[in-house]
Image (cartoon, helix red, strand yellow):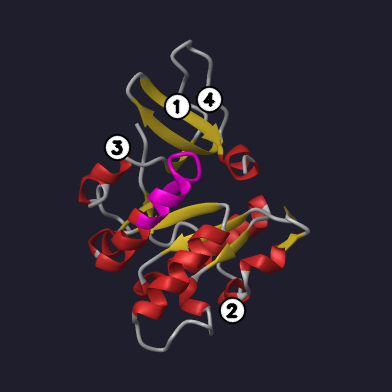
Amino acid sequence: MIKIFEHGAFSTYSQVRLDESRSSVLEHSQYGVRSKTTVFISHKHDDLEDLKGILGFLQQRYGVKVYIDSQDPSMPPTTSAETALNIKERIKQCNKFILLATNGAIESKWCNWELGYGDAQKFKKNIALFPMKPKGAYDSAYKGSEYMSIYPYIAYFDGTEKYKSGRPIERGYYVRTHEKDGNYITPLVDWFNDV
């Protein structure tokens, strides 16, 4: 059974500066060859503390370049059509799209718009949810369960789970994808490297 991450679960990684994620994703590409995998993280602005932990986790463990629009000084100060155009461009420029899928983000019209646009640009191969529920809440309190049946999502396997063949699944982080013929997992490192 997959467990939903809790708010604060990645706080040990939160010693990062969010302003480092404001630089253009184009800086990480030279002569058409990217030096790092770039990731657009859609998020609710109320979730900045959890976002810092996720940002640190992804950068330290996987060496990716994360872009978050809330730290981008080129974004207009007031949300407008220009904001939407800028975000569309950043999503296209990044290799991967992740929605920090908290209950607040699931209910946010803006995050849902970004998820829809990310889906159109990244398809199933390059899009994933990072599901997160309130600390101490049951998994049933998580509002994004239906999203997890549509989109690939990041999950942690503790080494006690097994493949259908009976072989144990190695402990670690994976991207889990639902298909008509079953569920598939890809190590998160491989997902980031498949660009």
Real-space Cα separation, disc 1 to disc 3, in angstroms: 12 Å
Residue 181 screen position, x and y as percent:
35, 18
Q: Alpha-carbon neighbours of circle 3 within 10 Å: few (<14), some, or many (≥20)?
A: some
Residue occupied by mark 1: 184
Real-space Cα separation, disc 3 to disc 2, in angstroms: 33 Å
Under mark 1, the amino acid is Tyr
Secondary structure type for disc 3? loop
Between 110 and 3, the residue placed more toward the observer is: 110
Secondary structure type for disc 2? helix
Residue at position x 71%, y 63% in the image:
28
Asked if 43 appears above or below 36 in the picture, the reply is: below
| Badge 2 vs badge 4, beta-carbon distance below 8 Å | no
Real-space Cα separation, disc 2 to disc 4, in angstroms: 37 Å
Real-space Cα separation, disc 3 to disc 4, in angstroms: 21 Å
Residue 128 inside the magenta-drawn segment: yes
Under mark 3, the amino acid is Ser
Under mark 2, the amino acid is Asp
- Name the front one of labels 3 and 4: 3
Residue occupied by mark 3: 149
- Name the front one of labels 4 and 1: 1
Q: Which residues are magenta?
A: 117-130
Choose the circle earlier in sequence order: 3 or 2: 2
Between 67 and 45, the residue placed more toward the observer is: 67
Choose the circle earlier in sequence order: 1 or 3: 3
Choose the circle earlier in sequence order: 4 or 1: 4
Residue at position x 50%, y 66% in the image:
89
Residue 57 screen position, x and y as percent:
58, 57
Residue 52 inside the magenta-drawn segment: no
Q: Which mark is residue 19?
A: 2
Choose the circle earlier in sequence order: 3 or 4: 3
Secondary structure type for disc 4? loop
Asked if 8 appears above or below 82 in the picture, the reply is: above
